[in-house]
Amino acid sequence: MELGLKGKRVIVPASTKGILRRVVDQLIDEGCDVAICSRSEDTVARSLRELSGGKGIAIGRACDVNDKDDYEAWLEEMIEQLGGVDIFIPGVSAGGGADSERNWWKSFEVDVLSTVRGCEVVIPHMEESGGGAITFITTTASVETFGGPQAYNAMKGSLLVYAKQLSQEVGKDGIRVNCVSPGPVYFEGGVWQMLKDTMAKWFAKVERDHPLGRLGTPEEVSNCIVFLSSPAASWVSGTNLIVDGGFTKRVQF
């Protein structure tokens, strides 16, 4: 299938590791020009070196998405360097935690506000260029009870509502807005490796209870993110794509 991504200008914040790094790898392979960031200048520099020599180019610098001024300045800077923006994939997260009110503020500021701020910056540029695609990275924990009540689940759930409403608002401008909700995904240095190391019995039960008998890989999720963000999915907007190998038990009407 031809995804039609060659030459597309893409912004993927906080994308130097995990699922979003695999997204960037695939976009570069498809011939996109991609802007990346991380809080660490060294991490960004290493990622840019690793991404060099592909079909597309990668640009970026260190940026704290939780710093409104820095984040908005980074977005405008990347859009200027790319010559516009066709695709925006916000997926940064503060992670889980249910031990204090601080987790709720952190998840709201990082997961929700950074996404909203990003959309408010990129959408006017997409309107000027005649359209675009925005793909939020959420979680299956936002559509089904999992792991107890916590900020991560609730705040990601709020993004599903925001994405749907936003898709209705900007559709007239040729902008599509969708969500991809991954189930448990294992990779070195990720949350599920930490859970395996610290809660081995619980991790083994989750793995055993999974219909496919295993957790997912970043590539299995990034394949879906890249497709949904591409022109090949041109008539898909306002949807939430569950990518979990059948892990959730709900019936999705």
Image (cartoon, helix red, strand yellow):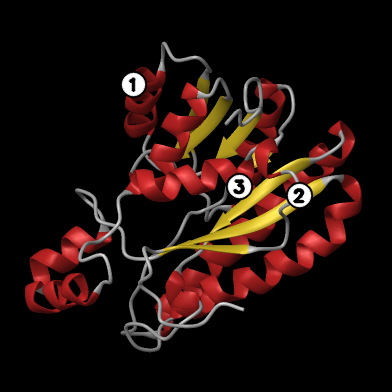
- At label 1, counting other C-alpha atoms closer than 10 Å, the crowd grade (few under 14, some 14-19, many 20 or more) is few
- At label 3, counting other C-alpha atoms closer than 10 Å, the crowd grade (few under 14, some 14-19, many 20 or more) is many
Tag 2's secondary structure? loop
Give residue 68's position: percent from left, percent from top.
62, 53
Which amino acid lies under the numbered mark 3 shown in the image of this protein?
A: Leu
Disc assigned to residue 59:
none
The residue that appears at 78% across and 46% down in the rendered structure is: 123
Give residue 69's position: percent from left, percent from top.
63, 48
Give residue 231's position: percent from left, percent from top.
70, 36
- At label 2, counting other C-alpha atoms closer than 10 Å, the crowd grade (few under 14, some 14-19, many 20 or more) is few
Which amino acid lies under the numbered mark 2 shown in the image of this protein?
A: Trp
The residue that appears at 89% across and 47% down in the rendered structure is: 173
Q: Quadrant of the C terminus?
A: bottom right
Disc assigned to residue 235:
2
Q: In this view, does 104 lie above or below 87?
A: below
Tag 1's secondary structure? helix
The residue that appears at 40% across and 21% down in the rendered structure is: 51
- Give the mark nearest the N terminus, 2 or 3: 3
**What count of labels does the image hold?**
3
Q: Is residue 67 above or below residue 9?
A: below
- CA distance separating discs 2 and 3: 10 Å
Pick the front one: 8 or 99:
8
Disc assigned to residue 50:
1
Residue 225 seen in the figure:
yes
Discs 2/3, front: 2
Which amino acid lies under the numbered mark 1 shown in the image of this protein?
A: Glu
Give residue 39's position: percent from left, percent from top.
41, 43
Disc assigned to residue 228:
3
Q: Are marks 1 and 2 in contact (CB under 8 Å)?
A: no
